[in-house]
Image: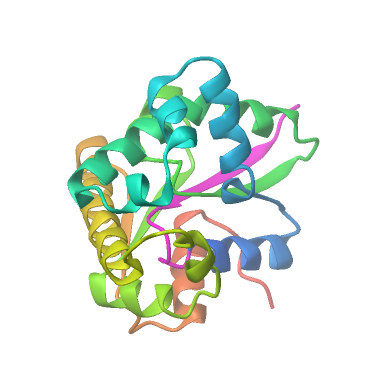
Amino acid sequence: MNRRVLFIGGSPCSGKSTIAEQISEKYGAYYYKVDDFVDEFIDMAAKKGYLACKNSVNRTPDEIWMREPLIQCEDEFRIYDEISEFVFGYLEKIDAGFIVTEGAAYTPNVMGKCGKKEYISIIPTPDFQISHYKEREWVTYILEGCSDKQQAFQNWMKRDILFAKQVKAECEENRVTCIVNDGLKTQAEMFRIVRDLFHLKQLG
C-alpha cells in the first residue's frame, strides 16, 4: 500500500498527543498512539528475552522509581530500542492510507535506524513538563506502591528532563527538527508549526 505516515516523537507531556489528535481530526488521518500499546510491547519483548524489557516487567514500584534518574533515563532508551520492532510491526498492520503516530518510543536514533522520513520531535521545557504532569490524573496510579511518592515523582521528573535533553542531542546529531514547547505558544500556534513542517494543506 502506498501510504503516508507522519511520526511525532519526543518527551512525555510535550503536546505530542494533542497535535496528533488535531491532525487526525482535521485531515482524516488514522491516529496510532504508541503509549496505548507500550505495556503490551514490553511484555512481548520480555518474552523474547530482551534484557531491559525483561527487567522492567519484574521490578517493583520502588525498584522502578527510586533508582537514580540517570539510570532510569538510560533504561528508558534501551526499552524503546527493544520494543521498536513491535511498534513498527503494529504500524505495518494498520489498514489506512494516511496515518499520524506519536510516542516517546520514536527516539531519533530508533527512527534513524529505520529510515523513516516524515519525522519531528517535540520536547517540553522542565517547567512546562512538571506543570503538566501535575495535571495528569494517572500520575497517582503510576506511583501506586512506592514507599515515598514525593521522592519517586521528583525522580520521575528528573528522568524525563534528562530524556528530553538526550532527545534534543540525538535530533541535532541526526539533523531532525526538534520543537521545544515552553508553554508560551497556544495549542493553535503549536499545531500550525507542526502542520507547516509536515507540509499539510491549510484548511479554510
Q: Answer above or below: position of 148 versus 167.
A: below
Q: Where is residue 92 in the image (x, y as percent from the top left)?
A: 68, 28
Q: In this view, does 24 lie to the left or right of 8?
A: right
- Front residue of 200 and 191: 191
- Magenta segment: 1-15
Residue furthest out toward the right:
95
Q: Is residue 72 left or right of residue 112?
A: left
- Front residue of 97 and 203: 97
In which quadrant will I find the C terminus? bottom right
Q: Residue 200's quadrant in the figure?
A: bottom right
Q: Going 45% across and 41% down the picture, which residue do you hit?
A: 106
Q: Going 61% across and 69% down the picture, which residue do you hit?
A: 202
Q: Going 75% across and 35% down the picture, which residue do you hit?
A: 94
- Front residue of 45 and 178: 45
Residue furthest out toward the top:
48
Q: Going 20% across and 37% down the picture, which residue do you hit?
A: 173
Q: Answer above or below: position of 110 versus 12.
A: above
Q: In this view, does 166 lie to the left or right of 198?
A: left
Q: Is residue 93 visible?
A: yes
Q: Position of residue 114 (x, y in %)?
A: 45, 24
Number of dots carrying numbers = 0
Queried whether the magenta region covers residue 159, the answer comes back as no
Q: Where is residue 39 in the image (x, y as percent from the top left)?
A: 58, 41
